[in-house]
Structures are given as C-alpha cells and as structure tokens.
Image: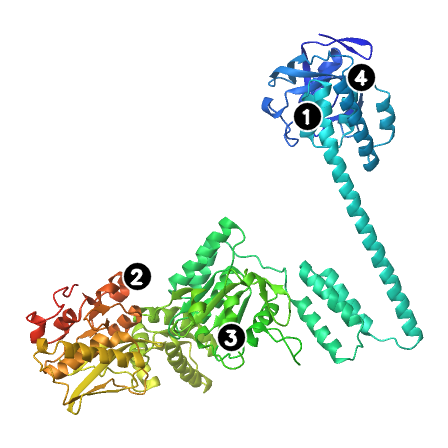
C-alpha cells in the first residue's frame, strides 16, 4: 500500500508489528518518545528495525494490563516510523516515533514472539476546499487559541505552527495532539475518518474545556483574594498588639485567642461548627479578658471545640468474636444478643447505618444495665451511662441557655464529650422512672433524642449548633412500659427480658457470680467451690426474685464469713460450700413454703399477677357478710383491679339464677374481697377470673381448687381476654409447685415464644369464656355451669 507523506511516497506493508501503547494516543504528523521495556514490544521493535522501520501503534483500553490480548486493544491506530532508538541505563529503550497515517486492523496475531496485525489504511482523499469544513476549521482555531491562553501548560509556539498548516486533516490532528484530555476522547478523534468529523468533536471538547478553565481561574482568584485579606488582617493585628504594648495596655487575652484559633485550625470540625467558633473567637478578642461575658464565651468555646464532632471508633465486625464476648459476659438474654448481631449484619451489608434504639424491659436483677456495658465491649465502642431515675428538669437533657449563670450543656452532650467518640453505646437507665414538674417534662425532650428521623439534627440549648446523634447505639432500660409515655415508647424497639428459672440462676451463680465474688472478697488464693445442692438451697429458700441480685448478696455473705475465718489466721487452700453450711452461715430459711392452701376452699382462689419485681402468685379471699349491697375491697388493690371485681360481681348478679342464687341476693349482703400481703400494691385486669371464681365460691358454698392457678381479664358478657407477663406468671407458679394453669385462649399464640424449659411439666388449659374456666376450677359445678339456663356458656370449653 502506497502512501504520500510530506511529498514522500511510502510503501506500507499489509502486515506490521504492533506496539501497544499506554495512556497516550499518537496522531499523524506527531513525533513522540516512547519508553519500551516489555519483551514482546522489544521483539516487535527489533522486527521493525530489521525490515522497514514501520510499526502499528495501538492504544490499550486499560493501562494496568502488562500482557494485552486482542480484546484489550483498540482496533484503530496509527502507522508510525521509527526515527531513533536509545538504550536507557535501566535497560529500557527510548524510541522516537513519527505518526504517518491512520490504519484499521483487519486481524491480530497475539500468540507469537510479538503482536502483529493485518491492516487497512484510512482513505485520506477528500475535497481540497469545502465551506463548511473551512468554517469549522476557523471555529476550532479560535477556540484552541483561547484554550492555549487559559492553559499555561501548552506553549504559545503551537499557535504559530498551526497557522502555517493548510491541510484540514493535519490541522485537526495538530490540535488533537496538544489537547489535554482523556484517552477515550483522543481515541474517538483518531477513529474519525474525515477532517469535518474531527473538527465537530474538537469544537465540543474545546468549548467544555474553556468553561472549566474559566471556572478554575475564578476559584484561583477567590483563593488569592482570601489569602491577601487574611495576611492583611494578621498584619493589622500585629500592629494593634504593638500599639497596646507601647501604651501599657497589653494583656494575655491574645494568647487565649491564639490558642483557640490553633485548636480550630488543627481540629476536624464541620463547617457549621467552624463558622460558629470563628464568630465567638472574634467576639472574645474584642472583650476585656476579666469581664464576666468573656468567661462565658471562653467556657462555651471549650465545650464547642472539645466535642468529638467527627471522631468515630471502628466497630468489631467479627460475628464469632462478638458472640463469644456477649455469651462470656451474660447467660441467656438471647433477644438482645440477637438484635446486636442483626445490627452488625446490616452494617456489614449496607455500610453506614443508623444506630438502633433498644429498650430492655424486665424485672430488677436480670442484667439489663450490665448487658449495655457488655454490648459496648463486644462492639469495641465507648460506653456511657446516664441514669434517668428521678430526673425532673428538661434542661438535664437539652441543657441551659447561655443567658443563665453557670449554664452547661445537657447530660447527653456531656456524656458524649466524656466518651470522646460520636458513636458510643449510650445507656439510658430507668427510663420508666422519669418525672415531670414545673421545670419541664424530660420525657418529651427525649422524643427528639430517641427518634431516628430527628436525632441527626439534635440541638442542645447551650451549644446552639446541631449535633448528629444518629450513629449512637441507644439502649434504654425499664422495669415496666406502663409508665413510659406512648409517644416515647413508640420510638423504641421493646425487648422483654424475663426472669430466670432456678436452673438458669444456678448456672449464672456457678459461671459468673462465684468467680466475681471470689475476687471481690479477696479469696483469689483459695479454691472456692459451691456444690449444686448448696446453690439450689440458696435459690429456693433464701431468695424469691426474678433476677439474681439477692442470690449474689447471699453468696457474698457466705464468702465474707469465710474471709473472716481466714483473716483470723486459719489457713485454707480449698473452700467448699455444702448444703449444710448454707444453713449454718445464712441462718434459718427465709422462704420455707407458701401461704397457698393445699385443699379446695370455699371463697378462696389462686391467681397469677405480674409486678415490676416479676411474677407473683396472688391468692384471693372472699367472705359474705350481712349488709346492704356493698362490695368491700382490701389489700392495696389498684383502680383497675377494683373495677375487675365490680365487673365480676355484675356478671354473677346477671346470671344469679343460673348459679342457683336468688335474683335479689345482693340486697342484704356485703361481700368482703381481700388479697393477702396488704402492704404490697396490686393492680391490673388479669385477676378478673380469679376474683369472680372466689366470689362465686363464697356465694354458692362450692370450694375452689387450689392446685390450679388462673389468670385472665373478664368482660360483662363472660368473655376472657388476653393478658401479659405470661413468662413471669408461669415462673411464679413453678416456683410454688403449681403445675396446672388456666390461661385465656387468646394467649395461645404467646406460649410458643416462651422457653421450653419453663413449660416443661406445666399443664396449660386455654379457655374463652368464664363458664369454661369455672368448670375447671370449681370442685363441684354450680347449676349454671351444666348449661340449663346459662347465657353464652356453650361457645367453648377447656382445651389443653
């Protein structure tokens, strides 16, 4: 193939060696030095030098590939002539090449010593003059001149040489060769077949580049102006300082201001914080150093610059390690542990994720507070705790405004500063014991803190700058959700922690409490062991609780008594606590049995109740007396429980004939309902069935079975509604040896979520109506329970 280049006729073979080039596009009429070091490119160069010094230069799609295949190379390149070869000290070859003509590869051969290609030259023939092409040429020439003026990396001599070129194709290639742009754009220019196509692409690219360069100049001018202003201000400040020193008015306030400026410059602060701090520092610099206002501003700046605005700790994301730490610190508590693992899983998949807001609800001593510290250790985060018990002032949460004397940020911000990280595990303890008075309602202030949609812009009254709390893992604890405002409860994910079974308490005592108390009581050098019988003796006869605090106190008491013996001079290497030692050390058992009657009794029923301390077995006593239609309730019964008793009596009066009672039996009668242990407050609707059974028994003379405990809310129509706290109630029944329980049928679904160990040995009866429950619990069925005159008693019976 013959080609004329600058009045020189060249004979170009149909197959040439290929040299792949990286990060550069060579155009015709362009001379460019290449560094060659790859083996197959050196072989291609040697082959070309032996033959006619012609090679085909093809650009690589990706520069990082050292051994390109056919798909890694562009199909259009340029035939180049080798002008000079120079060997470098590092062994590489520096080759000066001159672009001749565009060529399209028909096929590539990659497998040999070097890459070769069969090629076809572009048809360069075209009209000598075309008005549209001439217009495009002039437009591109003017734009390129503006581009060179704005871009200082291109010498002005290029414009002189461009003006002397008459050929449109050579003009376009010269501009393209000096264009500082992406490889993809230059390859597109190389593949354009006609000068007109190249001029159109160049016009668009140059227009875009000129706009960008103009913007760069504007930004550079703004930066220079800002620097000049800062230097001028610094010069004037130095002059002002010298004048004050000359007049004897020099003070140390400038040192404080300089220190604050230094902290601001070296710290990593958001833009809003930096702007606020600069305003306050300027205000401080104009104040007398000993004025009261200066002290307020200085204290404010210390708080503002001392917070960890953008300081975060890295979470531990190893599932096995996190689970191992959680299991090593606490026995059980599967739900909160699983929630933390879910949080880690989401964080690993989604990257940044808002911290969950979890509320752990359960009786005292089950490990709610300590599990928060364990979660922080498992995630490798900082831990802070804030007790909300007895907090009445809203300013404890939001802080005081700076207008008040001695104003401080709220305890949320104070705790974050103490943690020195913006993503700690934050424990809000006893959230159900918040108070409110004339100073404000802290529960309402917590709505913003515990709302994932709002806490990213939490504003403390003292700081007056938004602080992002969304990265904090908030954990709240409560004994009950009843006293938590509904709006606040709705913002939290409630996780109930039930009380422990006896075998769980024994495991906790053996694995956790004994090693901890051994260290606390100075018995580390003595081998301390508790026999299983001794642990169970303490659990069953010296404690009665849902948690393990009293168990911990009793074990600690025994260890202290042993410590006294050792302190008196007795040497012990091993200390074993047996069941007999428990009685000697702790005295007579505190809980030897129960007050529950063992035989069916008239006017006496056994119910189950839930309290903040856990579940309790609740006996109910009813005695009929002569009187005038009066219902007397004693035993510290709350309003809801009193209403349940009234509803039960109304049901009996409505169905008096069905139970063999006179319709007017209550006119000359007083019913006295009493729940023992009167000093303990009792409330809730779940004792409705128990109250009704005890009242009906006292009126009919039919005894109630005491080996069955019951729970369920009643309605005036005789339905039994679902109740809560089943875990705690069943645990209380097991503790007293009651293994038959009457439950509302609507609670059947909740039983599946309870531990199997808790349900083992229990016989559960599900009832839908009052009549079905009375059939199970009454020793002898009243007339109405057989169905002769009963209203709505045939809907359902007892089901097991």
Nearer the N terminus, badge 4 or badge 2? Answer: 4
Left or right: where does residue 342 sit relative to residue 141? left
Query: In whole angstroms, how far apart are the C-alphas of marks 1 and 4?
Result: 21 Å
Going 9% across and 81% down the picture, which residue do you hit? 661
Closest to the camera, between mark 1 and mark 3, is 3
Q: Secondary structure at mark 2?
A: loop
Q: Is residue 794 left or right of residue 385?
A: left
Residue bearing mark 2: 753
Looking at the image, residue 99 sits to the left or right of residue 345; the answer is right
- Between residue 542 and residue 623, name the one nearer to us: 623
Q: Which residue is mark 1?
A: 187
Q: Which mark is residue 167?
A: 4
Q: Residues within 10 Å of mark 1 (few under 14, many from 20)?
A: many
Nearest-to-viewer mark from 2 and 1? 1
The quarter of the picture where the C terminus appears is bottom left
Estimate the spatial distance between the alpha carbons at disc 4 and disc 2, rounded to whole Å. Answer: 86 Å
| Residue under the point 25% across and 84% down | 675
| Camera-nearest label, 2 or 3 | 3
When asked about the image quadrant of residue 217, the answer is top right
Q: Earlier in the sequence, mark 4 or mark 3?
A: 4
Disc 2 and disc 1: Cα gap in Å? 67 Å
Colour setting: rainbow
Give residue 702's mark: none
Which residue is the extreme one toward the right?
246
Disc 1 vs disc 4: which is toward the camera?
4
Q: Position of residue 379 (x, y in %)?
A: 51, 60
- The location of residue 400, given as percent across then percent down, is 61, 76
Closest to the observer, 711 or 403 = 403
Q: What is the distance, in whole Å, between disc 2 and disc 3 at their CAs? A: 34 Å
């Amino acid at each position: 193939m013959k080609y004329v280049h600058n009045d020189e006729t060249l004979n170009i073979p149909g197959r040439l060696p290929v040299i792949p080039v990286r990060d550069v596009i060579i155009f015709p009429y362009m001379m460019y030095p290449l560094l060659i070091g790859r083996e197959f490119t050196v072989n291609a160069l040697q082959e070309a030098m032996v033959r006619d010094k012609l090679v085909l230069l093809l650009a690589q799609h990706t520069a990082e590939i050292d051994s390109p295949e056919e798909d890694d190379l562009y199909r259009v390149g340029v035939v180049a002539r080798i002008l000079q070869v120079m060997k470098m000290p590092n062994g590489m070859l520096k080759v000066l090449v001159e672009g001749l003509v565009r060529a399209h590869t028909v096929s590539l051969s990659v497998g040999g010593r070097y890459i070769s290609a069969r090629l076809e030259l572009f048809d360069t023939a075209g009209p000598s003059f075309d008005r549209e092409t001439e217009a495009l040429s002039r437009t591109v020439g003017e734009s390129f001149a503006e581009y060179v003026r704005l871009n200082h990396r291109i010498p002005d001599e290029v414009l002189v040489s461009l003006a002397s070129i008459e050929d449109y194709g050579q003009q376009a290639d010269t501009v393209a060769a000096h264009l500082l742009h992406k490889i993809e754009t230059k390859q597109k220019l190389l593949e354009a077949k006609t000068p007109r196509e190249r001029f159109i692409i160049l016009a668009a690219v140059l227009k875009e580049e000129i706009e960008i360069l103009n913007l760069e100049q504007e930004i550079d001018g703004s930066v220079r102006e800002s620097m000049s202003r800062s230097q001028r201000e610094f010069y004037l400040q130095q002059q002002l300082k010298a004048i004050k020193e000359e007049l004897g008015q020099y003070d140390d306030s400038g040192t404080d201001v300089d220190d604050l400026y230094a902290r601001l410059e070296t710290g990593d602060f958001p833009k809003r914080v930096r702007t606020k701090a600069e305003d306050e520092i300027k205000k401080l610099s104009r104040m007398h150093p000993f004025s009261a206002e200066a002290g307020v501003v200085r204290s404010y700046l210390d708080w503002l610059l001392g917070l960890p605005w953008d300081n975060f700790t890295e979470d531990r994301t190893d599932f096995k390690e996190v689970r191992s730490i959680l299991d090593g610190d606490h026995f059980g508590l599967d739900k909160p542990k699983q929630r933390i693992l879910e949080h880690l899983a989401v964080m690993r998949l989604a990257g940044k994720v808002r911290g969950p807001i979890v509320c752990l609800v359960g009786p005292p001593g089950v490990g709610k507070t300590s599990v928060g510290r364990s979660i922080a250790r498992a995630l490798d985060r900082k831990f802070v705790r804030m007790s909300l018990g007895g907090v009445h002032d809203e300013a404890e949460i939001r802080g005081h405004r700076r207008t008040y004397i001695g104003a401080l940020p709220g305890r949320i911000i104070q705790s974050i500063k103490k943690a020195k990280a913006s993503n700690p595990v934050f424990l809000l303890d006893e959230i159900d014991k918040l108070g409110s008075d004339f100073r404000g309602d802290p529960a309402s202030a917590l709505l913003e803190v515990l709302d994932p949609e709002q806490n990213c812009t939490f504003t403390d009254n003292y700081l007056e700058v938004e602080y992002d709390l969304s990265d904090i893992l908030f954990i709240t604890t409560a004994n009950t959700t009843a006293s938590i405002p509904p709006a606040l409860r709705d913002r939290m994910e409630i996780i109930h922690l039930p009380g422990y079974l006896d075998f769980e308490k024994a495991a906790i005592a053996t694995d956790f409490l004994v090693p901890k108390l051994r260290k606390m009581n100075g018995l580390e050098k003595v081998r301390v062991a508790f026999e299983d019988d001794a642990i169970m003796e303490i659990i069953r006869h010296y404690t009665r609780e849902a948690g393990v605090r009293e168990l911990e106190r009793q074990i600690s008491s025994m260890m202290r008594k042993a410590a006294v013996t050792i302190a008196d001079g007795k040497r012990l290497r091993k200390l074993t606590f047996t069941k007999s030692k428990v009685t000697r050390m702790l005295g007579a058992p505190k809980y030897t049995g129960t007050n529950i009657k063992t035989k069916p009794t008239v006017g006496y029923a056994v119910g189950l109740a839930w309290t903040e301390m856990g579940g309790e077995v609740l006996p109910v006593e009813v005695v009929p007396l002569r009187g005038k239609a009066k219902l007397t309730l004693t035993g510290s019964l709350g309003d809801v429980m009193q209403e349940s008793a009234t509803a039960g009596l109304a049901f009996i009066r409505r169905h008096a004939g069905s139970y063999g009672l006179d319709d007017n039996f209550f006119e000359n009668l007083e019913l006295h309902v009493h729940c023992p242990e009167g000093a303990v407050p009792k409330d809730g609707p779940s004792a409705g069935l128990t109250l009704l059974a005890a009242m009906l028994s006292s009126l009919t003379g039919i005894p109630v079975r005491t080996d069955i405990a019951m729970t369920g809310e009643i309605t005036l129509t005789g339905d039994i509604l679902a109740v809560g706290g089943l875990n705690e109630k069943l645990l209380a029944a097991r503790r007293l040896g009651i293994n038959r329980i009457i439950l509302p049928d609507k609670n059947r679904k909740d039983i599946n979520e309870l531990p199997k160990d808790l349900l083992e040995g229990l016989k559960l009866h599900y009832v839908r109506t009052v009549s079905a429950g009375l059939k199970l619990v009454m020793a002898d069925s009243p007339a109405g329970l057989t169905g002769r005159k009963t209203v709505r008693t045939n809907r359902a019976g007892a089901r097991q």
